[in-house]
Amino acid sequence: MAAEDLYDGFDHAEYEDEARRRWGDETVNSGNATWHALGSDGRAGFQREMRSVTEGFAAAMTAGTAAADDGPQRWAERLHALISTFWTPDAQSFAALGRLYVDDSRFRATYDGVAPGLAAYVRDAMAAFAAAHLRDDPSAGRDDDGT
């Protein structure tokens, strides 16, 4: 699959029920509102940037660049910025999202369809970026009372 075709015609609605079960109505409603608020030009720009980031990761991997090197880390920073359109992942959640890209066969097929092994490469770049540049949310995993 060519990276330019990666997100063409993508309809997230088929995953909405699963997302609501996993992350709750408030999170999904917020994400949907943000997506719609971008407007058609903003959504197209988001998809262009996502393709650019994916192509950048693929080119770096193909060139044999280590995922923790400067180039892939710039792509990871851009990916973090894209994701932050909807929610701002801390170190733990950004690294976990990278693991999801490998562990979930749907994500893995999307990335590996661009270049075999790309999902694992993106995961590794995201983990390195998280470790070097992000902090963990100290309230993550706690109840509202801080316990």
Image (cartoon, rainbow, N blue to C red):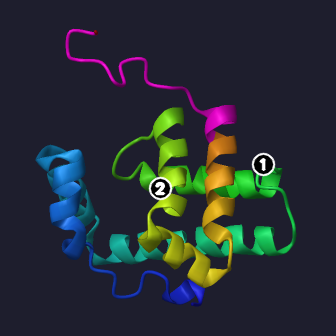
Taking the spot 12% from the left edge, 49% from the top edge, the residue there is: 25
Vertically, is 76 above or below 139?
A: below
Q: Amino acid at mark 1?
A: Ala
Q: Which residue is mark 2?
A: 100
Q: Which residues are magenta?
A: 130-146
| Label 2 crowd bin: few (<14), some (14–19), many (20+), radius 10 Å | some
Using the image as rendered, state which of residue 33 and residue 28 is in the foreground. Answer: 28
Using the image as rendered, state which of residue 63 and residue 34 is in the foreground. Answer: 63
Using the image as rendered, state which of residue 109 and residue 54 is in the foreground. Answer: 109
Note whether residue 15 is visible: yes
Vertically, is 14 above or below 80?
A: below
Q: Which residue is mark 1?
A: 68
- In percent of width and height, residue 130 lies at 61, 38
Disc 1 vs disc 2: Cβ atoms closer than 8 Å? no
State the quadrant of the C terminus. top left
What is the number of callouts on the image? 2
Q: Give the side of residue 118 with respect to residue 113, left or right.
A: right
- Secondary-structure class at tag 1: loop
- In percent of width and height, residue 141 lies at 34, 24
- In percent of width and height, residue 93 lies at 46, 40
Prevailing secondary structure class for the magenta stretch in the rendered image: loop
Taking the spot 24% from the left edge, 50% from the top edge, the residue there is: 22
Residue 112 lies in the magenta-colored region: no
For residue 48, the mark is none
State the quadrant of the N terminus. bottom right
Taking the spot 59% from the left edge, 90% from the top edge, the residue there is: 2
Real-space Cα separation, disc 1 to disc 2, in angstroms: 19 Å
- Secondary-structure class at tag 2: helix
Of the two numbered discs 1 and 2 in the rendering, the one whose residue sits closer to the viewer: 2
